[in-house]
Amino acid sequence: MASLWIRATLWLSNLHRRMLGVYFAVIGPRAAYALTGALGRTLYRLITPFRLRSEAQCSAALGRQFTPDEVARISEQAFVHRIWNLTDLLLAPRLLHSNTYQRYGGRIPEPQLTELLDAQRRGQPAILVSGYFGSFDLLPVFLGYNGVRAAAVYMPHPNTAYDDLRRRVRARSGCELVPVEGAIRRFPEVLESGGTVAIIADHHDERRGLPATFLGLPTRVSRSVGLLAWRYDADVVVAGNRRVGDEFAFAIEVEDVIKHEAWRGQGDADRVIRYITDRYLGALEALVRREPAQYLWGYARWGEQLARQLTAQFSTSQTQPAPPVPTTDRT
């Protein structure tokens, strides 16, 4: 009976998503983002555990830069941007084509585009790194339309119908999508042949990760990017796909390009991996600090243990009564 309910729920959600796609095509992008934005704000205020985790992590990372009210607004808008990622996917099949992607801000800026294409022609391996920032789902689409042939890793979604939609959109410009479990075999093949791979390198790796800090908080980061770059003499390009305004508009921002010549003199493999890791983390930090409302604050970026700890501390601080206002005895 439980499996029947699950199948029925998935069928209804898939039907609803298809109907939304048709409805968005009728009302247009601006109205679609306004509608889903209002829905996102309502949901955010109703899902208290997620709201507390988002604000706790945002406050711990950025609390010195922003007031508590600003942190609350940033966290709420970050959830709206996550909802808008689905809106992007539903609008992209109708709007994004090889002759329209530049209209929506999908062109990689110069001189990085020319350098990427030139490296591709020369057979220079490259690793494109991004994080859970902005409209990250559309990055593979824009890479392909810019002429950058890349193998992009992706995490399959448990809802197969939604996963099919996401894969169709991401691959529509010719990028190869590599399931995360196949990346350990496929990525070395691509880099060995002088190709380009794309990775969301924005995860906590508790067991095997390299100790590091991200936005001032301790984390453990996978060695994969640094190890692959060292082994195949690959350049590392750090970029994000920032959403512009509240419609179907974007801006690809290249934050750093780490040429393989830059780390050749850093010493042995461990030092090279540390250098590359610290540098790409710094670039991802710069993207987030410039536009914090487009980062995924509800995600346990620093691990579940720290997320629970920060949320508990934040919840306690929210429930503590304010200190009494001192008064002057005039008697």
Image (spheres, helix red, strand yellow):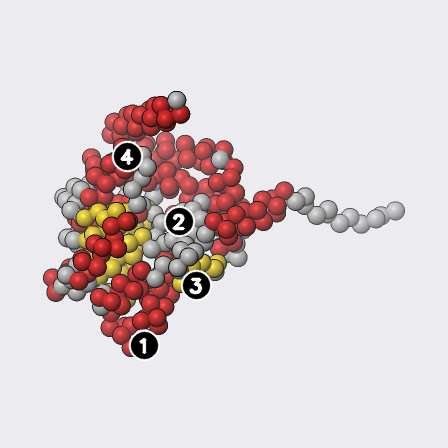
For residue 32, which quarter of the picture?
Answer: top left
231 sits left or right of 72 in the view: left
Percent from the top left, x then y, of residue 228? Answer: 26, 63
Disc 3 residue type?
Answer: Pro
Q: Residues within 10 Å of mark 2 (few under 14, many from 20)?
A: many
Q: Can residue 116 be seen at all in this image of the molecule?
A: no
Q: Which residue is mark 1?
A: 267
- Dividing the picture into quadrants, the one containing residue 7 is top left
Residue 301 visible? The answer is: yes
Q: Is residue 56 or residue 151 the one in the foreground? A: 151
The mark lying in front, picked from 1 and 2, is 1
Distance from disc 1 to disc 2, alpha carbons, whole Å, reads 34 Å
Q: Secondary structure at mark 1?
A: loop
Q: Can you identify the residue that label 2 sits on?
A: 295
The residue beneath circle 4 is: 160
The residue under label 4 is which amino acid type? Thr
Disc 1 residue type? Gly
Q: CA distance from mark 2 to mark 4?
A: 26 Å
Residue 292: percent from left, percent from top: 42, 51
**Which of pointers 2 and 4 lies earlier in the amino acid sequence?**
4
Q: Which residue is mark 3?
A: 211
Number of other residues with Cα within 10 Å of mark 3, as a class: few under 14, some 14 to 19, many 20 or more:
some
Dot 1 alpha-carbon crowd within 10 angstroms: few under 14, some 14 to 19, many 20 or more? few
Lower sequence index among marks 3 and 1:
3
Specify the farthest residue to the front.
1
Image vertical order of residue 108 relative to residue 275, above or below: above
| Residue 249 position by quadrant | top left
Q: Residue at x 31, y 39 (%)?
A: 157
Mark-to-mark CA distance, 3 and 4: 35 Å
Image coordinates for residue 82, horizontal then vertical, percent:
37, 41
